Structure formats: structure tokens, C-alpha cells
Image: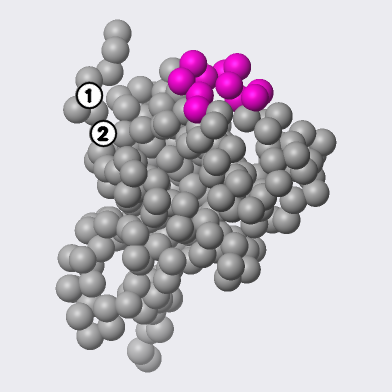
Amino acid sequence: MTTRATENPIAIESLTVRYGRKAALDGVTLSVPHGAVYALLGRNGAGKSSLVRCLLGQRRPEGGVAKLFGLDTWRDRKRAMLRVGVVPEDPDAPPSMTAGRLSAFCARLYRNWDGPAVLERIRRASIPTDLPFGQLSKGQKKLVSLALALGHTPELVVLDDPTLGLDVAARNALFEEIVGELADRGATMLLTTHDLAGVEGIADRVGILVDGRLVVDEPLERLKERHAVEPALEKIFLAVTEPQTEVA
């Protein structure tokens, strides 16, 4: 059975994840339509990583379901992930392999792998394609990971805190590549991030997790209109996530 073209790239329904007695996710429901750039925000421990792991079929939820293109990622992970590119928080690859060898390896996994485009992205970032992955800087590893994630022209790209730990130059280079991909193909993207200023210029929808609950899920412009006094995303985020002090 094939999935319909109208299926949203991401559909999460009543997703619940527990670690012992603690609920990392408490009945989260959200969807991301084709072509959208969804920024998932939250403080440390809010549940972002748990949601991404369930979405990518890396963890079985205690309740609810996470779907990619209509496919339950826990039950049908292999088929669902063929249409997805992932940039993890901590890029990982055999340290002795060069970017060129990594691309050649991935070409054996994907029929539509575009090796020349991958290497062109890497060269455009001024990263030597013959330098072992383990010798690259953190920013270079992120850019190589992004180039590899885009190598099979995925319909959906998931970026898990892609700019964490990067300096300003590396952060800007990464966002330039992301924006370029949006301009070229209008790819659907899900970003979890602490870089509020960086995503404000590219995200069109925002979700905010607080203690495992999705307390905000709406278009960015509408969110900013509701907070017209302080429309910057950082100010809105702080207003939503800061604990409220009770008045005696």
C-alpha cells in the first residue's frame, strides 16, 4: 500500500513518552504540512529530543503515534525514512572517512543519490572533501551532515538543534544552506533549536513545549500579532516558558 500524496509529512497524535514516573511528552498532537518550516522550541528537558526520537522511529512511545507521510515510524521506519533527511544534534560518522567516501557510501543506500550535488555543497562551504571527518571542526561536521542529509533529495528534513555549539560564522553558513534549500525546492523542515533569532527569519510555524505539553502551535506571524507589544520570538518564548510567580 502506498501513502497518498496529500498525507502531511509529519503527523503526531496524542504522543506520550515516559521515563519512569516522569512524562517527557504528555499527549502531544501536531502536524506539519508540505513546504512548511516548523520550529519546535522548548527549554532543556521540555521534551524536544523525545519527540524527535519517536518521530524518527528510534523510540516506541507509551501512547499515541508519530507518522511520517502517513506511516507509523515505529512499525514502518525503513519505508518512512527513505523520504527523510536528518541532521542530528551531534553529527556522527566514522572518523577516518572523508566527506567523499561518506557520500560514496550513502550512494549505495539511495537509488536517487546525487553525489556531485553533495560534493558541491561541501566545496561551497570551503571544506576539503579529502579530510577525515574526525579532523573537521564542529561547524564543518554540521555542514557535511547537512549536505549528506540532502543528498537523496528528501521531501522532509529534520534538524535537531543544528547550530548548537557553533560560532557565528558556522551558524550563518548553516542557515545559508538551509535557506538555499528552501529557495531551491521548498522542502518541508522540522527544526528543534535554541537559536531563536536564527529561525525567526525562516520558520513559518512555531511549536513550544513546556514540561512535555505543547502550549503553542500556530503560524509565526499570528503568534507575533498576539504578542504585539513584544513581537520578537525570544521575548515570546520567555513569556511562555518562564515559571509564573504566584502573588501572595
Instruction: Check the image and report above or below for 54 versus 42.
Output: above
Q: Is residue 74 visible?
A: no
The amino acid type, in three-letter code, at marker 2 is Asn
Task: Residue 174: give x, y in percent of width and height.
Answer: 52, 56
SS for tag 2? Answer: loop
Q: Residues within 10 Å of mark 1 (few under 14, many from 20)?
A: few
Tell me what residue is drawn at x 53 percent, y 60 percent.
Answer: 173
The residue range painted magenta reads 104-114
Q: Check residue 175 in the rendering and tell me which mark sits there, or answer none.
A: none
Q: Is residue 211 magenta?
A: no
Task: Residue 14: give x, y in percent of width and height.
Answer: 33, 39
The amino acid type, in three-letter code, at marker 1 is Ala
Colour scheme in the image? one colour
The foreground one among 177 and 117 is 117
Left or right: where does residue 70 sit relative to residue 195? left
Quarter residue 76 falls in: top left
Q: Which residue position holds label 1?
A: 5
Tell me what residue is drawn at x 26 percent, y 34 percent.
Answer: 8
Q: Is residue 108 magenta?
A: yes
SS for tag 1? Answer: loop
